[in-house]
Amino acid sequence: MAEEASALLSALTAQQRARICAPANDRVGRHWYFTPAERDGVALADLSPRAQQNALRLLRSGLSEAGFALATYILGLENLLACEEGWMEQYPGRPGHGRSRDPQLYFVKIFGDPADETWGWQFAGHHLVAHAFVEDGRVASLTPHFIGVNPAAAPSIGRNQFRPLAGEEQIAIELVAGLNGAQRQRAVFSSVAPSDILQQNRPLVDDAALPSAPADIYPADVPREEVVGFLAGLGIDAEAADAAPDGPEIAAYAATDAGARGVRVAELDPAGRELASELLAHYVERFPEDVRHAVFGWEPGEPLPADLRFAWAGSPQQGSGRYYCLDSANLTIEFDNTQNRANHIHSALRSRRSDFASDILRAHYLAEHPN
């Protein structure tokens, strides 16, 4: 990983290196965005072909082969989304760019010096955010990690399917279908799914979080009028809080202690526990096998975390919105498919203990943001 980062830096101009580099403990690095907008770092579009490949090699170093395949699918899907949205031209924060969806507008940022024992990187753009942070010479964090897919199910021919998160969706549907009455009562907290993952792009997991207004999840230094105009072109009210139509059940869920939400996976029958293990593996297996256990505290094939809980909202029916959360003292996974007539997925893997590298950085952030 350090070699790939160093190779990328060597392929940049001095000006690009100044834009891509930040201190290892840079506070801005703990802000991340999955929306299409200009942000810190250097875009693939601004790099030479060699440097673009170096950037993709850096991304690959923090993912498994399957995880990298998923990431590259997300980049390529921007072309189909552009077509479906009528080839819009505005890109917030990059006036005159001419493309609202661009597989080259993914941005790389490096925190610290890859030659040091503590450093990290971010690869981020629309619907894909990947991180890796190294402490004391070892990979200590790979989160926050975000994958979105729009359209979630793309047009295909015959038996072919373009559904990259089909497993993450179908396994959860089977899991909730297999619950008994009492378990279902605890697991299902709303008949209507929230309009987005509850955490969205918050720097740290906040158990009381509810979705913010659409314009609020864009970088603060992008002119708001550009964001509002872009969202208006998509038929989205940029200032309307997404949480508003979600109803009291979702607000009550957010107000409930995390340890009391949903059903404990340990209480499920063997078939239910096997489905939960398979579902968790779909997220963890996006990352290199040699670091999974150290980073996430769990590896496919191992017993599930004893405190793992599963919660669900919405409907299992095709075309209806659905949401679920797998949560433990360490990992928080959210999945939401409600937008674009339930054909637009947002999913995120977070670590309560090690998002953005360590408890030390978490302590610094909480000291700077006590509220």
Image (cartoon, grey):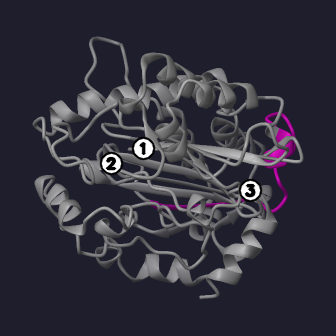
The disc, 3 or 2, on the residue closer to the chain's N-terminal end is 2
Q: CA distance from mark 1 to mark 3?
A: 34 Å
Instruction: Report x, y in % for residue 222.
Output: 31, 61
* Above or below: residue 286 compared with residue 362: above
Residue 141: image location, x then y, percent? 74, 49
Mark 3–mark 2 Cα distance, whole angstroms, equals 36 Å
Say what secondary structure mark 3 lies in.
Answer: helix
Residue type of the residue flagged with mark 2:
Pro
Quarter of the rendering containing residue 29: bottom right
Q: Which quadrant is the C terminus positioned in?
A: bottom right
What residue appears at the point 29 percent right and 34 percent down from the top-left corner?
102
Which amino acid type is shown beneath numbered disc 1? Gly
- Crowd class of label 2 (few under 14; some 14 to 19; many from 20; radius 10 Å): many
In the picture, measured across the screen, residue 33 lies left or right of residue 120, that is left
Residue 61 image-quadrant placement: top right
Residue bearing mark 3: 265
Q: Is residue 104 left or right of residue 31?
A: left
Q: Secondary structure at mark 2?
A: loop
Magenta-highlighted residues: 293-313
User: Is residue 158 highlighted in magenta?
Assistant: no
Residue located beneath label 1 in the image: 125
Q: Nearer the viewer, residue 173 or 237?
A: 237
> Does residue 141 appear in this view?
no
Residue closest to the eye, 111 or 15: 15
The label shown at residue 36 is 2
- Along the viewing direction, whichever of 208 and 342 lies nearer the viewer: 208
Left or right placement of residue 304 versus residue 161 in this view: right
